[in-house]
Image: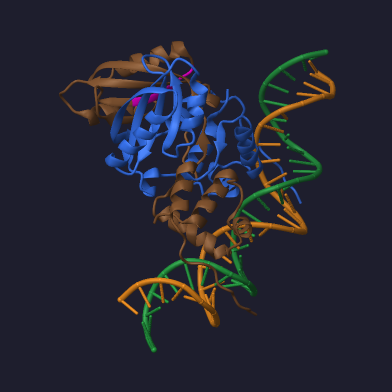
Chain colours: A blue, B brown, C orange, D green
Amino acid sequence: MPVDELDGRLIEMFAAEPRVGVLEASRRLGVARGTVQARLDRLSRDGVIAGFGPEIDPAALGYGVTAFVTLQLRQAGGHDPVARRLAQVPEVIEAHTITGAGDMLCRIVARSNADLQRVIDVIVDVAGVERASSVISLATQIPYRTLPLVRKVSSGALSGSRGHLGQRDS
Amino acid sequence: MPVDELDGRLIEMFAAEPRVGVLEASRRLGVARGTVQARLDRLSRDGVIAGFGPEIDPAALGYGVTAFVTLQLRQAGGHDPVARRLAQVPEVIEAHTITGAGDMLCRIVARSNADLQRVIDVIVDVAGVERASSVISLATQIPYRTLPLVRKVSSGALSGSRGHLGQRDS
DNA sequence: TTGATGACTGTACAGATTGTGCAGTGATTT
DNA sequence: AAATCACTGCACAATCTGTACAGTCATCAA
């Protein structure tokens, strides 16, 4: 069981207020500071928490247009060389190889629809790309999120161990 | 100009090592601590930095399968009601309304291909959804990233103001 | 039943960091 | 020329972090 209920509450707390430190978190969760630290260490070690990096909003950077581009690749060469070249393009935010009609699905951003045309042209120009069909994101109905999943997983893991009583010191 | 060269370096530093505090960052960048704090405040206020929340890896949670589902909706009702229902499904990680043949594009995750079938069934069962066609992500060639974009924007903004000299105190 | 483990709890202490405020300095703008 | 604005350096109080340690429970294997 990757995350239990306490892990879930911990993640939610840090998601809601990243500024709270370990000490404050332990106070709010009603556990010892060492416990929170140990949990965070474990979650990071296990890769559940990939990091605490700043989340950048492309829109705030002027790139308010998002689009998804499906690529058809030339058979020869394979995906990797194409991916490497796409990685050179800053506007390519993400890329997956996929099943189905297309070979690759990319998420790209642009400053405007006109700029989007430019970015798509750049992508189509990449060696190995045969054809590209794109759909523009008109609105983000559900922004990227993982918390619901964390809740589901952590609530599913019925807790087994519980508290204790503690003692006196000094 | 949303972000200048110093902002760019600042963002890159926090992306690489989120643990470094404001003080350490100021030392490495060779600027005063107050400057770093002011920059971070501004970037957060302007929305460039959306937050510092923990990045959760669905794969580490057991959801190693990612897929993109294109939805055709029934004309009546519109997108929002559907989006609200999709939001109830933890496995729906993201959703956009889009141009083109489909009406909506969702990103979903599942524990396995068999589990993926279950999730898709849940989505198809959502009221308002006419049809769904999905493609599975076989490999993530380019993981979600924004740093290249930050670099492009920040390098493009030719800096104007520069340092000073400082003084003595106490 | 008896260890051995592992996860927690409180506590402690030194060192480092944060939140703020302030005065002085250039560069830029009105 | 006056007013702003962004920075620098420094100061101080209040906190927090890293780390360590002993004692308690619960679980697990012998």
Of all residues shown, which one is farthest toward the left?
B76
Look at the image and say whether residue B109 sits in the magenta stretch: yes
The answer to whether residue B158 is above or below residue B137 is: below
Query: Is the N terminus of chain B in the top left, top right, bottom left or bottom right quadrant?
Result: bottom left
The answer to whether residue D8 is above or below residue A67 is: below
Residue at 48% x, 26% y: name it.
A82
Residue at 45% x, 64% y: name it.
B160
Residue C29 as seen in the image, left or right of residue B82: right
The image quadrant that residue A50 belongs to is top right
Is residue A94 among what the camera can see?
yes
Q: Position of residue C2 (x, y in %)?
A: 84, 21
Please name whichever residue, B124 or A60, is drawn nearer the observer in this view of the structure: A60
Q: Which residues are magenta?
A: B106-111
The image quadrant that residue A132 belongs to is top left
The answer to whether residue B142 is above or below residue D9 is: above
Residue A141 as seen in the image, left or right of residue A18: left
Residue at 39% x, 50% y: name it.
B47
Look at the image and say whether residue B93 sits in the magenta stretch: no
Q: Position of residue B140 (x, y in %)?
A: 49, 25
Q: Position of residue A71 (x, y in %)?
A: 38, 23
Is residue B58 among what the camera can see?
no
Q: Position of residue A37 (x, y in %)?
A: 64, 41
Please name whichever residue, A116 or C22, is drawn nearer the observer in this view of the structure: A116
Please name whichever residue, B71 or B160, is drawn nearer the observer in this view of the structure: B160
